[in-house]
Image (spheres, helix red, strand yellow):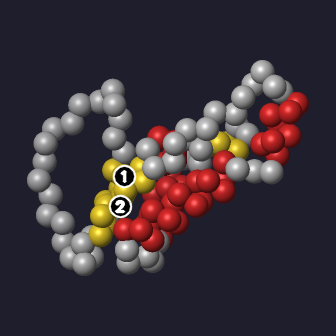
Amino acid sequence: MAFALLFTHATYEPAVLAFESRDKLLLATKGVTESRRGAAEFGVERVARLFENSNADSASGICDTVLREAYAFGSSPWARVYGFLRPGKRCRHDDLTAVALVRG
């Protein structure tokens, strides 16, 4: 299994890796890792743990698990209350995007 984080401010060297049978790859936007609940961030470690522990055999299943968890983490019922109490401090909502590849 592979978990990749790509950053726009970094450079990468090209590489060729063998994608063996049953290997999985997940790419996620920073909106997934930076999903917030108050001061807490969803985080790279949580995404990696979800990915590693996923028993989904399909790319859509992996994406569904990661995106649902990130959305639920950042969508606490208190987010609306916070918005009313601090109207000048808007909660930032970034995109939640993930792409997974699974070799059968």
The picture places residue 60, in percent across and down from the top left corner, at: 41, 68
Label 2 environment density (alpha carbons within 10 Å; few <14, some 14–19, many ≥20): some
Quarter assignment of residue 85: top right
Secondary structure of the residue carrying tag 1 is strand
The picture places residue 53, in percent across and down from the top left corner, at: 47, 71
Label 1 environment density (alpha carbons within 10 Å; few <14, some 14–19, many ≥20): some
Quarter assignment of residue 92: top right
Going by the image, does 33 lie left or right of 5?
Answer: right
Going by the image, does 52 lie left or right of 11?
Answer: right
Quadrant placement of the C terminus: bottom left
- Look at the picture and state if 55 lies above or below 5: below
Going by the image, does 91 lie left or right of 1?
Answer: right
Hey, what amino acid is under mark 2? Answer: Ala
| Residue at 13%, 48% in the rendered image | 15
| Residue at 70%, 44% in the rendered image | 37
The residue to which callout 2 is attached is: 100
Hey, what amino acid is under mark 1? Answer: Leu
| Residue at 37%, 68% in the rendered image | 59
- Asked if labels 2 and 1 touch by Cβ distance under 8 angstroms, the answer is yes
Judge whether residue 33 can be spotted in this image.
yes
The picture places residue 57, in percent across and down from the top left corner, at: 38, 78
Quadrant placement of the N terminus: bottom left
The residue to which callout 1 is attached is: 27
The picture places residue 86, in percent across and down from the top left corner, at: 83, 27
Judge whether residue 49 can be spotted in this image.
no
Secondary structure of the residue carrying tag 2 is strand
